[in-house]
Amino acid sequence: MSGVGPAGPSSASETAADVRQGRRTATAVLEEHLRRIAEREADVHAFNLVMEDQARSRAAEIDGMVAAGDDPGPLAGVPVALKDLLCTRGVPTTCSSRILAGWLPPYDATVVGRLAAAGAVFIGKTNMDEFAMGSSTEHSAFGPTRNPRCLGRVPGGSSGGSAAAVAAGFAPLALGSDTGGSIRQPAALCGVVGAKPTYGVVSRYGLVAFASSLDQIGPFAANVADAALLLDTISGHDPLDSTSLPASPPLASANLGRGADGLRVGVIAELAGAEGIAHDVASRLAEAVDALAAAGAKVEEISVPAVRYGLSAYYMIAPAEASSNLARYDGVRYGLRVPGADITEMYMATRSAGFGPEVKRRIMLGTYALSAGYYDAYYGKAQKVRTLIIRDFEEAYRSFDVLLSPTAPTTAFELGAKTADPLTMYLNDVCTIPSNLAGHPAISVPFGTGDDGLPVGVQVLAPALGETVMFQVAEVLEAAAPTGGGQ
Amino acid sequence: MTQPISNSDVAHVARLARLALSEEELGRYTTQLAAVLEHAADMAALDIEGVPPTAHPFPLANVFREDVPRPCLDRDEVLSQAPDVEDDRFRIPRILGEAP
């Protein structure tokens, strides 16, 4: 263990309160984080871009508002790191891909606008697996991110840069995106909190698309209350995203502090006992169960049979949608163009040079799953399995308020350990994928360490729009987590 | 249902996806895609007769927003990001036959 603390001496909400009331300046808060970045970023590589100049101007602006008696908002002066697939007007947004290197988006993502309106200071764009395809942040065109708690290990992925930034204290808050576990798995591996909200709760306008029926933006933080604060700041209907839910979003922070007394918690048998779950991860899950029972929850094992097929369904559906979404990178309107004699040659030269190996692999897998003769056997079948998973979850939630599972099968693995065999890498997502397929929320909470001293995460799953109870249970787990754990 | 995917299948798919692959890449992707497809074959064990497909977790139909004019993207800012521009338009290589 490197002895790196969480995101600084105070939580994001305390920082914002201090800045709003003039006890600290946004500039001082920012400089403290930039100092940590200067010390360790060369080793960690959490960022594709540190927005030093923009952040300093913005912090000065916040301080000016406070001096003038204006309230900058609930995230006043809080540094926030943004995964590099969230569009920031005039600031490079690469998706860690050569095909978008140097691209300056002409607009801001809705979440970026909401955070700015809340007084946040954007500190940088974080590294990721190219186009969010991967579970280790090794599939970045700009080199891997390393786990701040052990530099020889991966931070998880695809939002590995955001998880690492929070774990290293580079930013108290970060945004990621989660298509099959890309927030929760890196949160688990880096020992921070990460949540995927219900599909449609957070606007995706300005999120570069990977698999549109699965993608959701969500928060990273050093603790559960900060993650709830960040989610509550970005959630809510957006007319610019036609998949945005029209109803008011659930308040993630509404039930914090209420404990778990009387709640019904189901441990998903198929995931707790899935092949490949390491014994130390299983032990931490068992301790988490005991902790919730001690807090007054009624905990039982529950079978959700169809989740066993989640991985197979996901690795047909997500690549199929990706193959369609990534057709837009054609060298015409933005990004890389490699010249060719005619337009088809130009397309092929551009895409072959611009995409990395994992992106090509998924585009081909998806194109195959959608192609004539195979559609019913693969994509069509996966869509039906998706229905079964939703039905089995609905059945389970008739008896339980939340469900529990490991987040990832193991603690952080070594760089290079899984890049040669894609299927081995995909198996990292076995516990996180079902929530994406169902559109349900889920959160990873640090809960002790494995035999190697590295963080273990426990996942709390909730039904659609169940964020309130999900964060409530997550906070109980956080309070009960073994000391010397993820934090 | 598990057709082992062949080199020529992968070459065909790569053409559809507008990707040019080397021989070495073709071989590697064939092996890797076959492994994923073999894993996916476990879905064959499920009885899905009569189960409707799910395309979206919460299908919202006919999503409209108020027809209120609002600023669109700035043309110059958009075009400044294009690889090639002529007369305020995206310029592309020829798309039909031989140039006149």
Image: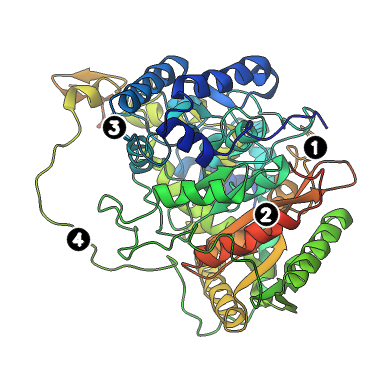
Residue A313 visible, this angle: no
Amino acid residing under circle 2:
Val
Amino acid residing under circle 1:
Ala
Disc 3 sits on a residue from what chain?
A: A
Amino acid residing under circle 3:
Asp
Crowding around mark 3 (Cα neighbors within 10 Å: few <14, some 14 to 19, many 20+) is few
Tag 2 and tag 4, C-beta contact below 8 Å: no
Tag 1 or tag 3, which sits nearer the N-term? 3
Disc 2 sits on a residue from what chain?
A: B
Amino acid residing under circle 4:
Phe
Between label 2 and label 1, give the one nearer the viewer.
Answer: 1
Tag 4 and tag 1, C-beta contact below 8 Å: no
Q: Which residue carries the number 1 mark?
A: A417
The answer to whether dots 3 and 1 both sit on one chain is yes
Crowding around mark 1 (Cα neighbors within 10 Å: few <14, some 14 to 19, many 20+) is few
The structure residue drawn at horizontal position 59% and vertical position 61%, both measured from the top left corner, is A257
Tag 4 or tag 2, which sits nearer the N-term? 2
- CA–CA distance in space, label 4 to label 1: 48 Å
- CA–CA distance in space, label 3 to label 2: 56 Å
Q: Identify the image quadrant of the C terminus of chain A.
A: top right
Disc 1 sits on a residue from what chain?
A: A
Q: Which residue carries the number 4 mark?
A: B64
Q: Is residue A210 left or right of residue B9?
A: left
- CA–CA distance in space, label 3 to label 1: 52 Å
Q: Which residue carries the number 3 mark?
A: A70
Q: Nearer the viewer, residue A133 or B42?
A: A133
- Secondary structure of residue under mark 1: loop
